[in-house]
Amino acid sequence: TVETRDRLRIAIQKSGRLADPARALLASCGLSWRESRDRLFCYGEALPIDLLLVRDDDIPGLIADGVCDLGVVGRNVLREQDFERRRSGTPTAFRELRPLGFGACRLALAVPDDWTWTGPTQLEGRRIATTYPALLRDWLAGEGIQADVVTLSGSVEIAPRLGQADLICDLVSSGVTLAANQLKPVATLLESEAVLAGPASEFEGERAALAEMLLRRLDGALRTRHSKLLLFQAERSSIAQLLPLLPDADAPTVLQVDGADRLALQALCHGHLTWQRLEDLKRAGAQGLMVLPVESMLA
Ligand code: ATP
Ligand code: MG
């Protein structure tokens, strides 16, 4: 049993690919911390929300055990441990609450460059090296393939050259590491990104209200992440040409400037405002175009 806590505790990666973006995202939700010297525990200052800095692999277990309330972890790690628990008959104890839009990668099968890939049946009886045995076994079972899963703790990409396996199942983002090892991706088992993970059951007491507030702020932060405020002026007559160029904008605010024909518009755009789009807008009659970042938003 876990002692009752009034404060919320979030586990994030101590160092690695997800560490900085996780912290930045939480900071954008108004959280701040006093750094402790051991740097494993950061006491929340602005709000009663503390951070625990750990290895990403430990995050699902910390949530399952109630040591932490929430965590930022790759979907790949969360699913792997979920499947592993199911296989061993341990109850599901955590779940994905929100995709966070960073740390994108995919879990893929990769075969030596000189293979001609004809499909999953080619894997029958082969040895596949991976650090994700539960996800791989689940996928193989779904395809009806019997293969030999070789579980490694790292450096999976050199396994074929070392003769430990015929192919691999590993995380891929750019594909550069695979290419450097004369491997090519042939099938995707899971599309992954960093996610906010939480317990399978609901929070209670103080922590329920804190978690709800954090999720609300997080949704706002995720929504405004790529949003920009677009300001410009135009003649009333060119509005019909301008609005179709802003399909990703909320209904713009329109102000009259001088006389009835000159308007000032402000529109919140959710897609990328490329130079190309700005030039198209200018050509359609927009003047004094200005793009401003959105710091926060509360729906
Ligand atoms: P830790 O020391 O915390 O165990 P790690 O070495 O297991 O760190 P990282 O390499 O920092 O972890 O990767 C963390 C997560 O980043 C992965 O689980 C995955 O979700 C994501 N990620 C994004 N792109 C890649 C990639 N190309 N290779 C590996 N992970 C990636
Ligand atoms: Mg790890």
Image (spheres, rainbow, N blue to C red):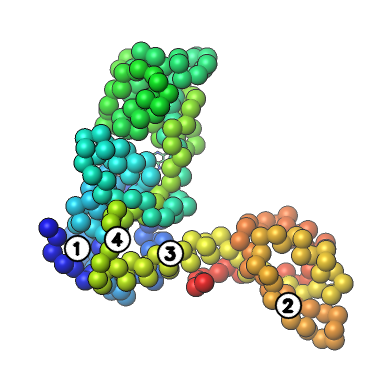
Where is mark 1, residue-wise?
37
**Label 1 vs 4, first from the N-terminus:** 1
Callouts 2 and 3 close, C-beta under 8 Å: no
> Could you say which disc has been placed on residue 218 in the image?
3
Q: Is residue 23 above or below residue 185?
A: below
Distance of label 2 from label 3 (alpha carbons): 29 Å
- Name the front one of labels 1 and 4: 4
Is the residue marked by circle 1 packed among few (<14), some (14-19), or many (20+) residues within 10 Å? few
Could you say whether the residue bearing mark 3 is in a helix, strand or loop? helix
Q: Amino acid at mark 2?
A: Val
**Label 3 vs 4, first from the N-terminus:** 4
Callouts 1 and 4 close, C-beta under 8 Å: no
Q: Amino acid at mark 1?
A: Arg
Distance of label 1 from label 4 (alpha carbons): 33 Å
Q: Amino acid at mark 4?
A: Glu
Where is mark 2, residue-wise?
254
Could you say whether the residue bearing mark 1 is in a helix, strand or loop? loop
Q: Position of residue 289 (x, y in %)?
A: 72, 69
Is the residue marked by circle 3 packed among few (<14), some (14-19), or many (20+) residues within 10 Å? many
Where is mark 4, residue-wise?
202
Residue at the spot 27% in from the left edge and 26% down from the top edge: 151
Callouts 2 and 1 close, C-beta under 8 Å: no
